[in-house]
Structure formats: structure tokens, C-alpha cells
Image (spheres, rainbow, N blue to C red):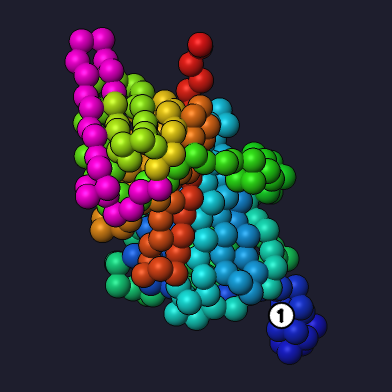
Amino acid sequence: MTQNETETTAHTNSMETFQATIEAERLQTTLALAHTLFDECHLYVDPEGVRVTAIDAATVVWADITLEPSAFETFEATSDHIGVDLERFRDVVGIANRGQSVQLSLDSATRTLQIRFDELEYTLALLDPETIRSPPAESREAFTPSGTVVADSATFDRSVRAAAMVSNHLEFDLDEDDGQFSVIAAGDTDNVSLTLSADDLVDIEPGDAHSIFSIDYLSAINRAMPSGVDIDLQFGTEQPLSVGYEFADGTGAVEYLVAPRITAN
């Protein structure tokens, strides 16, 4: 086989369904939002952008993270669906300096993701998405919140960290009559409560809502959250909590759906 034939064969066998360049810090942030709770994820690419979904083994928390094409310096994609080991992906990208550009290319024939920056080139073997747990298709559609609270990230951080000092669970309470949002944690000996009015929040759409959630999951969400973002909290009575916000200058968005702790009547 001649050199030209070899190159032609290699090109035929290599089918890149995704090629993009993105700032390292932006990619690091995206991976941190998923890795804070999950080891593996589904990654979808198409001309509309990139989507990451995952659900934990206990089916308590689900995540949906999206990046628009405008989040990238360059972006070209056809439709593909892969499974990714988040820890390995995060560790490789974590080597890059924040201001560096990271080149990504997905080869559908070899099922590998090429990661390049500076002189480093890393080939990440992908996972079979069929082996990764998928969020139920109806998870978001079946969720009907009673009220919405928009708080800045500093308020969310303070609420979660204060509650974690005394309890393993945190209670969110929204009162339609007085228009106040309360965060309550009751421990064996100590209690924490934080009551916020409309003046303390970015926005509030009050409705009667009361649910209890695990501190562990909310603490993980809080750790990965960028500073300076507005957090959209939607919940009802013994219904899931939706935690959503935009990042990457509005070109990225994340939503976590956290199942409540159901209490006996």
C-alpha cells in the first residue's frame, strides 16, 4: 500500500463527529459541575451544542448541563452520543492553564476523544453509554413547582453551609401569605434558621411549598457553583428541588433536580 493509500484509508476510518476549541477555564467549570456528584455521564453533541446528563446510583439527584456553540472558540459537530469517565476527563483538562485553549475532537470510529493543548495530546477512551444510568425521560416534565426563589450564590452558599453545621438535612419553606422564604435545619441539639423576604432576594414567586433535602447533595452542588451567579430555586411540597443557573457568560446552563426526603404524616 502506498503512502497516499494509507493516508486515504486512515482518513476514511477516522470519522470526527465533533471538533471544537474552548477556553480551559470554561471547560474546567463545566466538568466540575458534573463531577461534583457523578463519576460518569452521558455526553451529547449536535449542531446546537453540547449536553451533559447524569443521575446518581441512588436516583436522588439528576443533572442537565448545556453549552451553546457560542461557548466555544470554534465549534463543528454532527449528532453523537457517548459515555465519559468524568474523573479522567477532568484530570486531563485540569492540567491546562485557565487561559489556554483546549482542542477537542471526537472520533466516532475509534470511540475516542482527543484532547490537545500546548504540546500535550491525550486520547481518552470513551464508555459505552448503554452501561451508564440515564435520567428518566419524564424527570423534568413530571415536576410542577409551587413557587420560585431567585437568590444570589452568596446567599445560597451561606444557607447551605450554616445548615450543614447542625444537620444532615435542610428544609426549604415558602409561605404564599407573607411572601417569605425560609431555610431551616434542626439538629440533635442546635438549630439554624434563615428567613428571607423579597428585599433579600433577586426575585420571588411565592406559593405554599415545603420540602426537606439532603445536605450532602446540596453541599456538593454548592461546592462546584461559580461565584456571582443568580440561582433559580423551584420546589413544592414534598416535590423535587430544581437548582438552576447560567454560567460561562450566559452560554452555559445547568439544572440539578434533587429528590426530597419524604416525611411520614
Question: Who's the residue at 59% across and 78% down the image?
Answer: 76
Q: Is residue 79 above or below residue 253?
A: below
In this rendering, position of residue 113 left or right of residue 29: right
Which image quarter: residue 22?
A: bottom left
- Between 80 and 106, which is closer to the camera in this rendering? 80
In this rendering, position of residue 51 left or right of residue 149: right
Q: Residue 165 in the image: x percent, y percent?
A: 22, 25
Q: Residue 34 in the image: x percent, y percent?
A: 46, 48
The residue furthest right is 1
The magenta-colored residue range is 185-205
In this rendering, position of residue 68 left or right of residue 139: left
Three-letter code, disc 1: His
Question: Who's the residue at 48% across and 23% down the image?
Answer: 261
Q: Is residue 80 visible?
A: yes
* Residue 196 falls within the magenta-colored stretch: yes
The residue furthest front is 177
